[in-house]
């Protein structure tokens, strides 16, 4: 009736991340040249987003399975007109987990820490990572039995560049969302994560709380008050070669400045009523302050957990804080997924080696913290005041 499986250990880490440098255009470039570059970048972005995603462009956990998904995880449920449902059906989340050269071990750890059979996961190592690292990540994913049983983890084979300061990062996220829609369209929320992120609640906690929220809500930090940042953040022109070149090249800033747009307004019409000005993420470390942050003390750890955030960000590779989150918050063993309601094995290392109905959730204290945080966001009129309102 149930399948007994053991999960594979994580591979060793790769080389450190590559860095990106910038240069400045010579001042004697003409405006005509600048406009040509900008036009090329724009149409290249449109071209990239329009590229179809075929099965050859992803390594899929589905490719090794000829049959349908494991019926133990997704049993057929006859609908009874007299049966009263015990609660709402859990939603499904589509995750895009992205990293760069040397990030495959971090991506795998994040995948195990945020895994649930109901969700969909697309893993992306950008083009700065060698193809061998991408292949090894795909092989490791295909060797994990629960991923094969649920058929919900894929690795992008034809990667993109994603420079943090350029528009290629947005293009990569949109491209990932497009692939996820082609792989499976039955998900409700899209969450992009980087290799430096980590969950502060289990997926049972998160899915339980989201099941009681309208599915058209969007959680995103935003502001319409630019002020003094206007000149620094909106007027510079960045030429991002990651949009249209297959080889790594430097992004660069044009010497000219652009005028602010006056023909459109962001978050207008209906969309403004569905955006919540909070991304449910806690910034554990400020990467701009120093290269290697000091260890997090107990008071800082408690503040992070009690924030009610679903994720935290900017962790270093193998930060000891991650081990503490695994042990105290997620109850996760190394190289294993987080135990949930779908895990039927004996407590310990084999908890999720036997699995059952993926719709069964077992929320814990993390759900209470997340519920409290969301209630605070919606209370006292803050929901309306923090939405994207027209000025």
Image: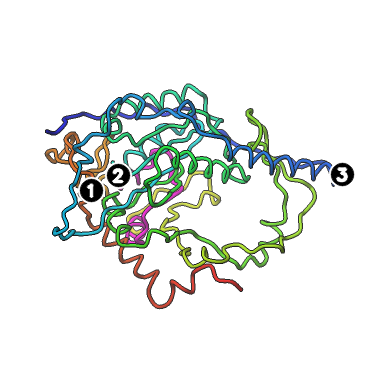
Q: Residue at x 57, y 43 (%)?
A: 169
Quadrant occupied by the C terminus: bottom right
Q: Earlier in the sequence, mark 3 or mark 1?
A: 3
Q: Disc 3 or 2, which lies upstream in sequence?
A: 3
How far apart are the alpha carbons under marks 3 and 1? 60 Å
Give x and y (percent) for residue 349: 18, 35
Viewer-closest of 327 and 139 = 139
Identify the secondary structure beneath mark 2. Answer: loop
Q: Residues within 10 Å of mark 2 (few under 14, many from 20)?
A: many
Instruction: Using residue 164 as the reference point, say whether residue 88 is left or right of it.
Output: left
**Label 2: which residue?**
118
What is the CA distance from the residue labelled 3 to the residue labelled 2? Answer: 54 Å
Q: Which residue is mark 1?
A: 359
* Separation (CA) of disc 1 from disc 2: 7 Å
Viewport quadrant of the N terminus: top left
The answer to whether residue 384 is above or below residue 78 is below
Look at the image and say whether residue 237 sits in the magenta stretch: no
Query: Which-is-in-front pick, marks 3 and 1?
Result: 1
Residue 6 rendering spot, x and y as whole percentages: 21, 29
Which residue lies under the disc numbered 3? 30
The mark that comes first in sequence, 1 or 2, is 2
Q: Position of residue 253 (x, y in %)?
A: 73, 45
Kindly check if marks 1 and 2 are in contact, taking CB atoms under 8 A apart as contact: yes
- For the residues carrying marks 3 and 2, which lies nearer the camera in this image? 2
**Please, what secondary structure does the residue beneath circle 1 have?**
loop
Residue at 35% x, 46% y: name it: 321
Magenta span contains residue 316: yes
Segment tinted magenta in the rendering: 300-325
Name which quarter of the figure residue 82 lies in: bottom left
Q: Secondary structure at mark 3?
A: loop
């Amino acid at each position: 009736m149930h399948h007994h499986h053991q999960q594979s250990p994580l591979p060793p880490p790769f080389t450190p991340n590559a860095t990106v440098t910038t240069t400045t255009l010579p001042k004697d470039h003409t405006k005509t040249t600048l406009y040509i570059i900008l036009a090329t970048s724009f149409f290249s972005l449109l071209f990239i987003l329009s590229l179809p995603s075929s099965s050859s462009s992803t390594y899929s956990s589905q490719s090794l399975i000829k049959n349908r998904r494991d019926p133990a995880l997704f049993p057929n449920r006859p609908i009874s007109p007299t049966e009263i449902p015990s609660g709402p059906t859990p939603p499904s989340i589509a995750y895009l987990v992205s990293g760069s050269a040397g990030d495959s071990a971090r991506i795998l750890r994040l995948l195990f820490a945020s895994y649930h059979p109901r969700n969909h996961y697309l893993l992306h190592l950008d083009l700065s990572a060698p193809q061998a690292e991408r292949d090894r990540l795909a092989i490791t994913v295909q060797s994990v039995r629960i991923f094969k049983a649920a058929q919900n983890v894929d690795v992008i084979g034809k990667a993109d560049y994603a420079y943090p300061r350029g528009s290629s990062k947005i293009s990569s996220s949109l491209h990932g969302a497009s692939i996820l829609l082609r792989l499976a369209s039955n998900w409700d929320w899209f969450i992009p994560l980087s290799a430096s992120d980590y969950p502060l609640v289990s997926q049972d906690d998160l899915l339980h709380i989201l099941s009681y929220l309208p599915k058209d809500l969007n959680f995103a930090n935003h502001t319409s008050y630019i002020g003094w940042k206007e000149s620094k953040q909106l007027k510079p022109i960045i030429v991002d070669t990651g949009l249209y070149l297959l080889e790594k090249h430097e992004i660069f800033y044009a010497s000219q400045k652009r005028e602010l747009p006056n023909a459109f307004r962001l978050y207008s019409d209906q969309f403004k009523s569905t955006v919540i000005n909070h991304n449910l993420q806690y910034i554990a470390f400020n990467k701009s302050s120093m290269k290697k942050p000091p260890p997090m003390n107990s008071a800082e750890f408690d503040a992070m957990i009690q924030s009610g955030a679903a994720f935290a960000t900017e962790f270093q590779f193998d930060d000891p804080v991650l081990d503490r989150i695994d042990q105290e918050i997620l109850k996760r063993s190394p190289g294993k997924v987080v135990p949930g309601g779908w895990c039927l094995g004996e407590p310990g290392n084999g908890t999720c080696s036997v699995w059952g109905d993926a719709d069964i959730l077992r929320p814990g204290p993390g759900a209470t913290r997340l519920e409290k945080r969301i209630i605070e966001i919606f209370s006292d009129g803050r929901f309306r005041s923090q939405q994207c309102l027209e000025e």
